[in-house]
Amino acid sequence: MVLGLGLAARAVLGESDTPTATATEASTPASSPATTPTAGVTVPASPRTQASSPTPTPPARTAPTPPGTTNPATPPPRRSSSGRSVADWLATLRALDAQRAQAFRTLDATTLDKIYVPGSPPWRSDRALLADYRKQHIHIQGLRIQIDKTTIVRQTVATVILRTTDHLVAGHAVDESGIKTPLPPGTPSTRLITLTATPTERASASANWRISSITPA
């Protein structure tokens, strides 16, 4: 997602058939925020890092690899049949990231149904994070993930696999007293993000693409 959405928040709150198309964005340097956690605030572990440090780690757009699994082989590039460009998919990922930022700002789990295929691993991972935040009365403001690079690995009319590198550039954990704790800038991370559209939407130019899986690249 998203995407990326990748991701990070457990320590203060305890984020195709078209081959080789690539788009890059100029990295916007983020100032290094203070990483001292707010007293008494615990941050849930990020799906990307599972950090145990007391430093705030923001929710990552990517989902963790299930225990006992290995990184999947990269699918071979295939020729595009849907005609969507890298720029189109970048716009889709940014839109999904914006919806995800809203979900973590409002702690509304129903928003995740617009981002992920319901029941998919990343959908379950983000729902668990939101549940942790609600228990701790913490939400995330200004969550922003920068997409550094995206390549179309495989694309069809129903599915696209994107190799995406992104990192967190902004965000604050806010507790019930209104105290804000900056989330530290993230390290660029590369994942394979699979997006799918429902059968009734596949022929539409405005198809509602959702993330169905996020795996290590």
Image (cartoon, rainbow, N blue to C red):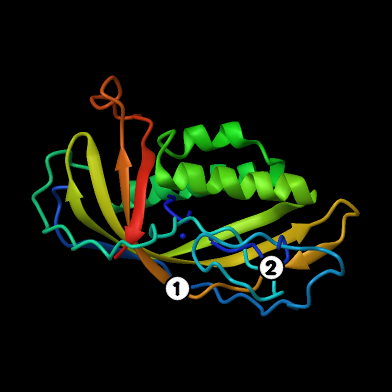
> Residue at (38%, 43%) from the top-left corner?
211
Q: What residue type is labelled 2?
A: Ala
Q: Tell me which label, 2 or 1, sits earlier in the chain.
A: 2
x and y percentages locating residue 140 in the rendered image: 70, 54
Relative to the observer, which residue lies in front, 177 or 51?
51
Residue 34 point in image, percent of width and height: 75, 78
Confirm whether residue 92 shows in the render. yes
What is the secondary structure assignment of the residue under circle 1? loop
Q: How far apart are marks 2 and 1 (CA)?
A: 19 Å
Q: What residue sits right under mark 2 in the picture?
A: 11
Q: Where is residue 214 in the image (x, y as percent from the top left)?
A: 36, 53
Q: In the rendered structure, which amino acid carries the disc numbered 1?
A: Pro
Asked whether residue 85 appears in the rendered view, the answer is: no
Q: Name the residue under label 1.
A: 188
Say whether residue 73 is left or right of residue 96: left
The front one of 57 and 188 is: 57
How busy is the neighbourhood of tag 2: few (under 14 within 10 Å), some, or many (20 plus)? many
